[in-house]
Image: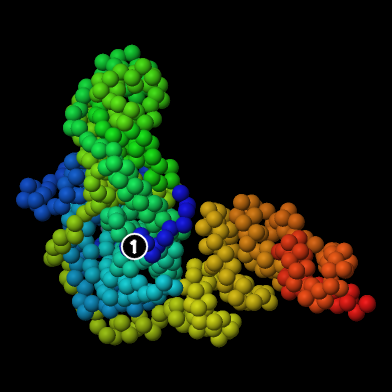
């Protein structure tokens, strides 16, 4: 799965959208606090029903309409820390001025142009995540940019928004939301689709995260930052992956989506070659499973329905992403209707017998080339689920569907809903516009945190880094770690930069989980390196080792890898080699050092600095030659 991707060939276009909660005293449109509550402390709840009228629904796009098919009743849990604004029983108050200041600060740090007047708009949402049926959003700034090693990435828009109510559970047919999160201010930052590699995507996400945190006015911790990624490859389709909570996952998600789309293209070609087709025939196959020992089928009271995908044999079982097969894509569609699916690529299994599978195939006159898909559910539900599966299978013959997907913890993703169209916006007449005057901007500008550019020139001057490396570390998440190491130990700045950026990236590319590595691991490694405990060549190996055993001390790790060797031993080792090669040295003279260096380094790489070895070797060779 982790093979190299040829970015120049696949034509990747990706953009990021980041939503970050602001750490303001009060919510965006009322005076309630912005703290999340223990859901058990809810003091009241009320129900609302989907009330989109026909004409309103006509203006709602396909994504919204599909959402509306699933849920009708919404239950909201309130607290003594929420008010009538969250309940939609009172109109919103004026825009929170503190939130405007923070969003302007972020905008300026992103080289953006603030608008003259902030207007609040309504964006229709019908999933129940807002009691009033729309989300309020206000454009704050446009047209900024970020610089990356691969070139600039435009930052198109920055909006100030209210966070949605938090979905906590479903009770029967009702979806239950918690009102504590509703109305917490968010900045939404959207980049242009200028990103061309997975590595660049990760870097842009990191830079955005650093800029937001540098204000000191954003919320921290799980769930306070959410990112969506737009991805397309030239031969594929545009897909939006939602709900990424970990910045470090961005690169992996981009990579896995490229793999998914490439695999789907391969599968399409294979299906075409086979003349595969989808039959719109849904069969009641319950009679085959009358005596079935499958729990799933028993739970569905023996009701089983199936379809046949002609020419799809083996396709559903093909892996298209880490831990996901083409069958998982189809299963996502059935899951929308609350049913799981099984198919003959994986059967017999799940207590379904070989005999049952044979009968199933016979019913559809399925050949070796075909795949039968079944679901266990009552007729109405089974039909709607299988119909969705058939439509997705049909798409597999034609194109990669444009869709919104949900990020999974391992970097893969699952189908969520069709790609929404551009949201229609309506003015929010209850909230007056806010004028942004020059004085306000001037005041914010005078207190901006250090920019990447300022940090970069500081590094060039203080640590003598060249332009490329200074830029790289100034924009890297590990910049403060770099500063701590440089301020404590006498180590070449270049080595520290390479280690905390390139080496870490390389380890990740090797598939090593670097998350367990903490700042103190790096600090300890450089402390020991500055005391010549090992050669700098060993740094990647030590990091790799500690990533798998983060609880181990650096000293112990050095010992375990077999790096500890005192200078006496080193001298003896080199001396032994030199005396065993005396003939060779006499023949080659001083030129013998080169080949001998290779022999010595093979043993001592990482244990001792290469420069030190070279000096020792030269000395010993000279001794042999002058002894003649
Ligand atoms: Zn309130």
Residue 360 on image: x %, y %: 29, 21
* Residue found farthest to the left: 55
Q: Residue at x 18, y 32 (%)?
A: 280
Q: Residue at x 15, y 62 (%)?
A: 425
Q: Quadrant of residue 289?
A: top left
Q: Quadrant of residue 562?
A: bottom right
* Residue found farthest to the top: 291
Residue 476 on image: x %, y %: 49, 70
Number of numbered discs overlaid on the protein picture: 1
464 vs 537, nearest the viewer: 537
Q: Residue at x 16, y 47 (%)?
A: 65
Q: Badge 1 local density, few (<14 within 10 Å), some, or many (20+)?
A: some
Coloring basis for residues: rainbow
Q: Quadrant of the C terminus?
A: bottom right
Pointer 1: what residue?
Answer: 11
Q: Quadrant of residue 566?
A: bottom right
Q: Residue at x 21, y 45 (%)?
A: 67
454 vs 150, nearest the viewer: 150
Determine if residue 302 is in view.
no
Residue 189 on image: x %, y %: 32, 67
Determine if residue 488 is in view.
yes
Residue 366 on image: x %, y %: 28, 25
Q: Secondary structure at mark 1?
A: loop
Residue 454 versus residue 320 in the image, above or below: below
373 vs 451, nearest the viewer: 373
* Residue found farthest to the right: 628
Q: Is mark 1 within 8 Å of ligand 1?
A: no
């Amino acid at each position: 799965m982790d093979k190299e991707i040829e970015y120049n060939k696949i034509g990747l276009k990706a953009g990021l959208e980041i939503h970050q909660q602001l750490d303001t005293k009060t919510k965006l449109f009322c005076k309630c606090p912005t703290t999340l509550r223990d859901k058990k402390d809810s003091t009241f709840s009320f129900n609302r029903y989907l009330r989109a009228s026909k004409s309103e629904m006509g203006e709602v796009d396909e994504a919204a309409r599909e959402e509306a098919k699933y849920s009708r009743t919404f239950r909201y849990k309130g607290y003594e820390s929420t008010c009538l604004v969250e309940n939609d029983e009172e109109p919103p108050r004026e825009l929170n001025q503190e939130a405007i200041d923070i969003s302007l600060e972020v905008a300026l740090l992103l080289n953006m142009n603030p608008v003259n007047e902030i207007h609040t708009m309504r964006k229709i949402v019908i999933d129940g995540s807002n009691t009033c049926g729309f989300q309020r959003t206000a454009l704050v700034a446009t047209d900024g940019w970020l610089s990356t090693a691969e070139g600039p990435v435009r930052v198109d828009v920055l909006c100030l928004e209210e966070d949605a109510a938090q979905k906590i559970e479903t009770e029967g047919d009702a979806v239950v939301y918690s009102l504590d999160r509703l109305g917490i201010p968010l900045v939404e930052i959207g980049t242009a689709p200028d990103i061309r590699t997975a590595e660049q995507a990760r870097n842009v996400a990191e830079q955005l995260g650093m800029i937001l945190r540098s204000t000191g006015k954003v919320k921290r911790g799980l769930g306070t930052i959410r990112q969506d990624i737009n991805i397309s490859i030239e031969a594929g389709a545009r897909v939006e992956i939602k709900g990424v909570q970990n910045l470090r996952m961005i690169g992996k998600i981009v990579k896995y989506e490229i793999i998914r789309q490439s695999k789907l293209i391969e599968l399409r070609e294979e299906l075409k070659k086979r003349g595969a087709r989808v039959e719109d025939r849904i069969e009641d196959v319950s009679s085959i499973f009358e005596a079935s020992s499958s729990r799933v089928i028993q739970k569905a009271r023996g009701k089983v329905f199936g379809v046949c995908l002609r020419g799809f044999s083996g396709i559903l079982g093909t892996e298209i992403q880490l831990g996901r097969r083409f069958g998982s894509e189809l299963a996502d569609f059935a899951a929308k209707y609350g049913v799981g699916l099984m198919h003959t690529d994986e059967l017999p299994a799940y207590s379904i017998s070989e005999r049952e599978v044979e009968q199933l195939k016979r019913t559809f006159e399925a050949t070796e080339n075909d795949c039968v898909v079944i679901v266990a559910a009552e007729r109405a539900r089974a039909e709607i689920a299988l119909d969705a599966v058939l439509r997705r299978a049909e798409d597999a013959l034609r194109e990669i569907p444009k869709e919104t997907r949900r990020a999974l913890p391992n970097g893969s993703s699952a189908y969520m809903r069709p790609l929404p169209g551009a949201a229609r916006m309506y003015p929010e007449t209850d909230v007056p516009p806010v004028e942004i005057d020059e004085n306000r901007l001037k005041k914010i500008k005078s207190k901006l945190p250090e920019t990447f550019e300022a940090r970069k020139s500081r590094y060039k001057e203080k640590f003598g880094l060249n332009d490329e490396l200074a830029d790289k570390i100034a924009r890297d998440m590990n910049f403060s770690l770099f500063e701590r190491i440089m301020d404590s130990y006498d180590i070449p700045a270049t080595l520290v930069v390479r280690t905390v950026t390139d080496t870490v990236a390389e380890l990740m590319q090797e598939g090593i989980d670097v998350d367990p590595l903490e700042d103190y691991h790096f600090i300890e490694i450089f402390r020991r390196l500055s005391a010549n405990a090992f050669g700098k060549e060993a740094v990647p190996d030590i990091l790799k080792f500690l990533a798998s055993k983060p609880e181990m001390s650096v000293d112990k790790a050095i010992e375990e890898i077999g790096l500890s060797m005192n200078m006496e031993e080193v001298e003896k080792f080199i001396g032994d080699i030199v005396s065993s090669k005396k003939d060779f040295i006499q023949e080659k003279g001083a030129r013998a050092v080169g080949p001998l260096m290779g022999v010595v380094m093979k043993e001592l790489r990482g244990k001792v600095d290469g420069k030190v070895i070279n000096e020792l070797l030269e000395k010993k060779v000279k001794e042999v030659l002058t002894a003649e």
